[in-house]
Amino acid sequence: MTRLPWRIHFFQRDVKDDRERTVPAVVFLDGLSGKVVAEFLAILDAVAEAPPPSFSGGGKWEAMRHEMAGLYEARVQGNGMNHRLFCLLERNADDLGGPSTVVIDGLSKPKRSAARDDDYRRIRRLRAEFLASRTVLD
C-alpha cells in the first residue's frame, strides 16, 4: 500500500485576529537568505514524504517539550544564526485535505542561545489562533 505524503500548509491569521490576514511563517521566511529558505523547504518536504510519525529528523526536525509540547521545529543554521520554523502536525485534518503539517511561525537566534520567552509565547498564541480558526494560505 502506497502512503501519500502529508500536505504542507502555512497558517494564515483570521481577519478577526489580524485585518491584514498575515501569514507569519511566510513573513519570517521572507527575511532569510535563499539558501536557508531552501533548506527549510527541503526539511518540510522530507517530513511530508516520510510521513511525520516515522520521520527521523537527524537534528533538523525535533519535537518540542514542556510549554511548547505538541509543536515541532525545523532547524537550520545560517549566517551565524540558528533559525527555527515551528510546525503543528494535524493527523486527522479532513478540513485541510488530509494529514497535514501546518507551519505556524519562525524565529532566529544567535548560536548557543536560548529563544526568548516572548518568542515562545507568540508561537503558542499563534498556534491557539490556528486551532480556533483553522485558516491556512490558499
Image (spheres, rainbow, N blue to C red):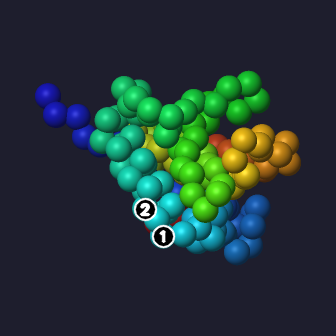
| Of the pair 126 and 112, the residue shown nearer to us | 112
Location of residue 138 in the rendering, given as x and y in whole percent from the top left corner:
46, 66
Judged left or right of residue 10, residue 39 is left
Q: Are marks 2 and 1 in contact (CB under 8 Å)?
A: yes
Judged left or right of residue 11, residue 50 is left
Judged left or right of residue 74, residue 94 is left
Which residue is drawn at the image coordinates 42% and 48% (left, top)?
Answer: 43
Which residue is drawn at the image coordinates 57% and 37% (left, top)?
Answer: 72
Q: Residues within 10 Å of mark 2 (few under 14, many from 20)?
A: few
Q: Is residue 135 visible?
A: no
Q: Which residue sits furthest bottom?
A: 20
- Choose top left, top right, bottom left or bottom right for residue 69: top right
Judged left or right of residue 103, residue 100 is left
- Mark 2, secondary structure of its residue: helix
Q: Residues within 10 Å of mark 1 (few under 14, many from 20)?
A: few
- Mark 1, secondary structure of its residue: helix
Which residue is drawn at the image coordinates 48% and 70% (left, top)?
Answer: 34
Q: Is residue 65 visible?
A: yes
Which residue is drawn at the image coordinates 43% and 62% (left, top)?
Answer: 38
The amino acid at mark 2 is Ala
Residue placed under numbered mark 1 in the picture: 34
| Of the pair 28 and 14, the residue shown nearer to us | 28
CA–CA distance in space, label 2 to label 1: 6 Å
Location of residue 95 in the rendering, given as x and y in whole percent from the top left corner:
46, 47
- Choose top left, top right, bottom left or bottom right for residue 17: bottom right
| Of the pair 118 and 127, the residue shown nearer to us | 118
Location of residue 52 in the rendering, given as x and y in whole percent from the top left corner:
41, 33
Q: What's the mark number on residue 38?
A: 2
| Of the pair 38 and 15, the residue shown nearer to us | 38
Location of residue 101 in the rendering, given as x and y in whole percent from the top left corner:
47, 44
